[in-house]
Amino acid sequence: MQALILAAGECSRFWPLNDRHKAMNKVQGKTILQRTIDSVRRYGIDDIIVVRSPGAEYMDEELPGVKFVVQKEPKGMGDAILSAEKYLTEDFLVLNPKIANFEEIISEAVAEKERSRVGMVLPAQVTETPELYGVITMDGERVTGVVEKPKGLKTGLRIGVIYLLPKEFLEYQKRVKEWQYSFEDALALYMKEKDVRTATPNIKSFSMKYSWHLLAISHFLCSLTKRHISESANIADSAKIEGEVHIGENTRVFENAVINGPCWIGDNCVIGNNSLIRDNTVIEEGVKIGMGTEITRSHLHSGTTVHSGFIGDSVIGRDCRIGAGFVTANRRFDRKTVGVYVKGKMIDSGMRGLGAIVGARTNIGIMVGTMPGVHIGSNCLIGPGKIVKENVPDSSKVV
């Protein structure tokens, strides 16, 4: 069996963390794509193909031993699968790079395939928000169709975790009209002519549609973190490190800092005096946190510097520079869920706590605040004393 991982496309809904493909975001020192590959290999599949976008050569460089093909234009999932046709020589898995225990899902799918002796198995999971997904319809044990984003249902079985497809599916893909949703058309055609089954593995999976979904992945990995303090780390005698906390090589934790796990702090970081790092926070390699900063339930990417302030339920991109007194508001006064504008449309994040999402290489001046759910693009400059109430596009100046 082979594995085909789809890592192409513009990832526009994942803005502002899409300066590279969303799967190349690191969580606890590894990209999400690498974690996906590791999970597939744990099941025993070593023949792995990744479909990438043009110009994404960094994937090739960082992932040796994987075959890469280029999807020349973002024409949808069906086109992405056909772009890898020359490498697909047997039954294959199709999956999007997310952080989950894929080996467990694969095991359930393969077991169902062997039991029912069918060519295609579509693992599905129960969702209480079926209006966000493709939901399967069934006749007995047979899958008969997929309804995209149905309205009026309280629960449903959503697909899209992985797809276990026979090699002959490629011919069905060629039989349908080429357009953005040709894959769904090919599935419908195959279901009409062949027996398709489902498996319902009872494990946690993750969405990677919007930027704030990275927080759920980060929190999940924190829940698995075990206490480890590297021998080369320099921890002040008055610092307190409590619970399941990982501290990487050559990281310094200064006097009176407090780290309440679960938390993960990478290599070559600095945690300043009297800082508080707590509750499912991930700090990647080379991050510097200044004196008196509180960070909770947040994810800071590599190379970022924060002078002081409060960061809650937020994601800060790579190589940002943030001045003193930075504050992310992360809750509405009425405690309702936070709405976020994505591509001009208001999306309910489903989260009552959501701070700021900041893209890579953005500089933020002193005494800046952000309202709940605000997105700030990459390569931006936010001048001192500003309260950012609306999304800020990439490469913008707010002064």
Image: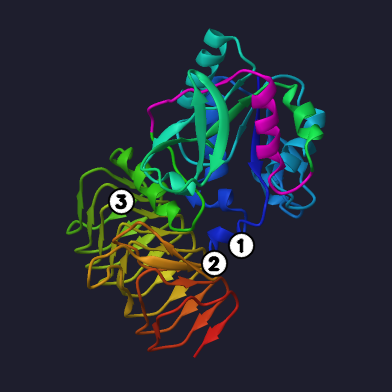
Q: Which of the labelled discs sits on residue 174, or is there none?
A: none
The residue carrying mark 1 is 19
Q: How is this picture coloured?
A: rainbow
Q: Identify the image quadrant of residue 188.
A: top right
How far apart are the alpha carbons under marks 1 and 3? Answer: 25 Å
Is residue 179 in the magenta section?
Answer: yes
How far apart are the alpha carbons under marks 3 and 2? Answer: 21 Å
Relative to residue 190, is residue 149 drawn left or right?
left
Relative to residue 54, is residue 245 drawn left or right?
left
Relative to residue 227, is residue 167 drawn left or right?
right
Q: Secondary structure at mark 3?
A: loop
Q: Which of the labelled discs sits on residue 280, or is there none?
A: 3
Q: Would residue 248 be seen by someone viewing this image from the given angle?
A: no
Identified at 47% across, 59% down, the residue is 301
Q: Position of residue 397 (x, y in %)?
A: 55, 85
Is residue 120 in the magenta section?
Answer: no
What amino acid is at disc 2?
Ala
Pointer 1 with pointer 2, Cβ within 8 A: yes
The residue carrying mark 2 is 360
Q: Secondary structure at mark 1?
A: loop
Work out whether 95 lies above or below 21: above
Specify the segment rendered in magenta: 178-203
Q: Secondary structure at mark 2?
A: loop
Identified at 70% across, 30% down, the residue is 189
Q: Would residue 11 be seen by someone viewing this image from the given angle?
A: yes
Q: Residues within 10 Å of mark 1 (few under 14, many from 20)?
A: many
Pointer 3 with pointer 2, Cβ within 8 A: no
Work out whether 366 lies above or below 267: below
Q: Position of residue 77 (x, y in %)?
A: 68, 42
What amino acid is at disc 3?
Asn
